[in-house]
Amino acid sequence: MNTFRPVCWYCGETYEAEPIYTCRRCKGTLDIRYEYKEIFGKAYFEPLSASAGSDIWRFRELLPIWPNRKAVTLGEGGTPLIRTHNILNIANNQSLWLKLESVNPTLAFKDRPLAVAMTAAAQFGLNEVVCASTGNTGVAAAAYAARAGLRCTIYVPEGTPEEKRAAMEQYGAVLHTVKGHYSDAYKVAEEMALERQAFNLTSTYMNPYAVEGNKTVAYELAFQLGKVPDWIIVPIGAGPLLSGIYKGFKEMQLAGFIDKLPRMAGVQAEGCAPIVKAFHNGEAGVQPWSDPVQTIASGIADPLLTYPADGTRTLSVIRESKGIALAIADAELHRYRKLLAEREGVLAELSSVTAVAAAAHMQQTGLLEQNATIVSIVTGHGLKDMSAAINHTKGSVL
Ligand SMILES: *Cc1c(COP(=O)(O)O)cnc(C)c1O
Ligand SMILES: [Zn+2]
């Protein structure tokens, strides 16, 4: 029997497990709901917590996959959580931890959603996948499509790092560069997926199956820390990673495994920050980013042009968690990337460095309470956009 089904995030309409992206009644994006009573009937998380360090599939009852289906996997998940010692002047018994999603099989957290989505594609008998990507989704899609033996076509905006393009091609994906930014690529991928009957893996709230993979970060954090962190700081494009993590904690609460929820901090780059703007202006909904998209944090540069509701969905999760949204300037990203590498031995993608720079800002502005446990999600590895660092330091050769 099926223990999950797609449900409209907005109007609650329910659907059968099938390749579906939006509610037929209100056009809203979807969420996956489970038969929680059945799954949590006997203790669920407690027995699992003993077996730390394996991949996301130990949580498969909470992933939208039919029983007895073979997972498309490269061993994603089970990433390290390390405590920082030198990057911030941590006082008052605060602690800052880094969740190293940068050591997933394709060096970014996107392996979690893409492993789930590719397994769903196989479950639905599809043989072709399509996505728009700022880079990391495309690399993960290409790798997992290769693993599953599916055809993969990827649309990336101009300015996508060479490292990511080259990786997609090595995995055998067909790569197209779309003039403009991420929202332009989003539109082309949407049309092509429809035309070719391909599964659309675009990393917004487009694919409800993919989003579920992000929950596994939450389960791992609770096991690794042995408690719920006070703050989780997440770099956000449209925000499914942040929402997925929060959903994972809510599920653990529902199961009676934890008794509080973390506050979620969503971080964007100043040069493309539609969600932060709405948060600061106290607006109910997110507006598309109408200024030019100007940032080196290419992995999170999403102006949400034709799908601002995705930003509103993320904003509502941030508010529900009593969290915040904040933006970081590009100059800070180069500085903190270097500091993080020098002081902690962690090389992060510029988009990911936002989460560490944000921790510093939150500390300096007194947002972090005494004894707070803070986790910054290092979403991607520095090698994924190393050319940006090389270009940045070129001027300093003597
Ligand atoms: C995709 C991505 C993000 C943003 O995640 P969303 O779930 O799309 O908001 C953050 N950092 C990196 C490195 C990414 O690739
Ligand atoms: Zn609906």
Image (cartoon, rainbow, N blue to C red):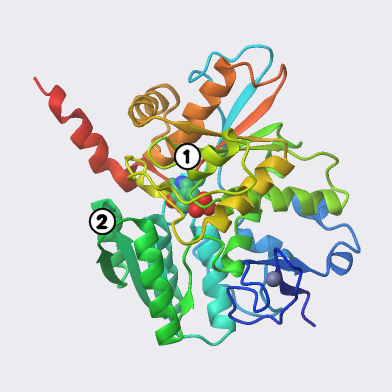
Say which mark, if any, is on residue 268: 1
As drawn, is 259 to the left or to the right of 397?
right
Q: Nearer the viewer, residue 349 or 318?
A: 318
Secondary structure under badge 1? strand
On-image quarter of the N terminus: bottom right
Where's residue 82, x and y in %? 56, 33
Where's residue 305, x and y in %? 44, 57
Where's residue 392, x and y in %? 22, 32
On-image quarter of the C terminus: top left
Judging by the rendered image, the residue that carries numbered circle 2 is 158
The amino acid sitting under disc 2 is: Glu
The amino acid sitting under disc 1 is: Gln
**Crowd class of label 1 (few under 14; some 14 to 19; many from 20; radius 10 Å):** many
**Which residue appears farthest toward the left when viewing the image?**
398
Distance of mark 1 from mark 2, alpha carbons?
Answer: 19 Å
As drawn, is 124 to the left or to the right of 262?
left
Residue at 15% x, 22% y is 396
**Crowd class of label 2 (few under 14; some 14 to 19; many from 20; radius 10 Å):** some
When the figure is inspected, residue 334 is found, relative to residue 6, above or below; the finding is above
Where's residue 393, x and y in %? 20, 28
As drawn, is 267 to the left or to the right of 143?
right
Q: Kindly indicate the quadrant of the structure image that contains residue 158.
A: bottom left
Secondary structure under badge 2? loop
First-in-chain label (1 vs 2): 2
Residue at 66% x, 72% y is 26
Q: Kindly indicate the quadrant of the structure image that contains residue 206.
A: bottom right
Residue at 56% x, 41% y is 278
When the figure is inspected, residue 117 is found, relative to residue 255, above or below; the finding is below
When the figure is inspected, residue 52 is found, relative to residue 120, above or below; the finding is above
Residue at 74% x, 68% y is 11
